[in-house]
Image (tube, rainbow, N blue to C red):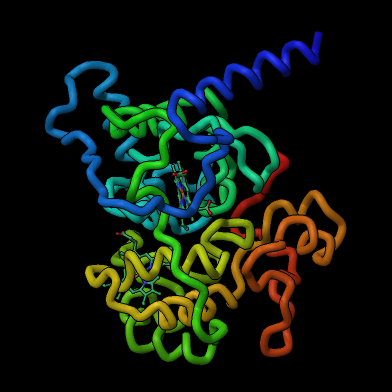
Amino acid sequence: MAVTLVATLALSSAALAQDEGVERDYQIPLPEAPEGEVTFTPPHERDLPDNQYGDMVRKGRDLFVDTQSLRGEYVFNDQNCANCHLDAGRLANSAPMWASFGVYPAYRGKNDKVNTLAERIQGCFTYSMNGTPPPTGSEPLVAMQTYLHWMSTGAPINESLPGRGYPALEEAEQAPDRARGAEVYAAQCAVCHGDQGQGQKVGERQVFPPLWGDGAYNWGAGMHRVNTAANFIKANMPLGKPYSLSDQQAWDVAAFINSHERPQDPRRRTLDTLEETDATFHSHHGFYGDEIDGRRLGDHADFGENPRPLDG
Ligand code: HEC
Ligand code: HEC
């Protein structure tokens, strides 16, 4: 029985693949944005309908740009979703939300299973927001899903659109270097993000996000990977001057930022030692567990403000 079912499934997906003339495994990865011109345009907010759907979209948009309104409940650092998904999630090459709705459910190596869109959003809460994800079906999550759904109006299903994710840089010519990165940082980033990476506030409002320390993304977040940060930085930073850094500068400054302390990887809770956490979850390009200036990064029990990372 099981064999027949598998065979039937294999046959029907083979037929689908044949129809399109491409082999596909339905496991579209991130972060590579496919080559090609960005042609998709999300709808305008002024065209939102004045009904319950429209209200839910507006609520999702508000939460996306002011995620701090969920501080203390679901968010435990100084971030808003729009810090890393610019222009309220509309900007191409800044992991835009219109390119993500149609590609979930999708397999993710990060947790080795098929993730729904809700789970993908919850992932950014756990790591990028150092938070506790809103439960499936709760209003904040439904609002965000509705916002993403609306933004994707007219986008194809199960196609990775040009402009998705952050465009992948070529390997650096010279190995990314923290000391060179510190110079780039001082000259081009510190003015907004602060000389201690602490960001900047005007009154209570965070205007420039912190890049390390307790207010930043934690050690489990995609952005702590040197390659992901380099890709993001090249296409999006310094703010207002995209693509102005050389590839080498983007790699170097990403290495500099990501070799600073930040809240512990919440998955550390599930394992006994730093070594185990490093070996299980960090086989990628990052500094977690490395010795820098005589101290091992991630060798602490500081989960930032989050009182209950992972265990609810
Ligand atoms: C500190 C930066 C950061 C913040 C803040 C952040 N994200 Fe992300 N997000 C990323 C990165 C990096 C990726 C993808 C790259 C990866 O997974 O390696 C991503 C991917 C995603 C994706 C999948 C995109 C795709 O095309 O597959 C969704 C959906 C998403 N984020 C939603 C959110 C939401 C909603 C919030 C706020 C609750 C948020 N993110 C906050 C960095 C961030
Ligand atoms: C003019 C001010 C400004 C400058 C200069 C600037 N940034 Fe940013 N940066 C921002 C703002 C604002 C955001 C959040 C995005 C938004 O709100 O549009 C941001 C977001 C980020 C993020 C997203 C991660 C997070 O934790 O939120 C990174 C990484 C980053 N900047 C790195 C850099 C680097 C590296 C440089 C220097 C090469 C730089 N920035 C220069 C203003 C600036």
Q: Nearer the viewer, residue 228 or 259?
A: 228
Q: Quadrant of residue 79?
A: bottom left
In x, y percent, where is residue 53? 28, 19
Residue at 58% across / 52% down in the picture?
127
Q: Is residue 121 left or right of residue 90?
A: right
In x, y percent, where is residue 308? 68, 46
Where ligand 2 lies, by quadrant? bottom left
Residue at 58% across / 17% down in the picture?
12
In x, y percent, where is residue 94? 35, 55
Residue at 45% across / 58% down in the picture?
78
Which quadrant of the figure contains the C terminus? top right
Residue at 27% across / 28% down in the picture?
153
Which quadrant of the figure contains the N terminus? top right
Is residue 238 positioned above or below 68 on the image? below
Number of marks present in the image shown: 0
- Would you say residue 308 is visible in this rendering? no
Q: Is residue 75 left or right of residue 132?
A: left
Outermost residue to the left: 46
Q: Is residue 47 left or right of residue 18?
A: left
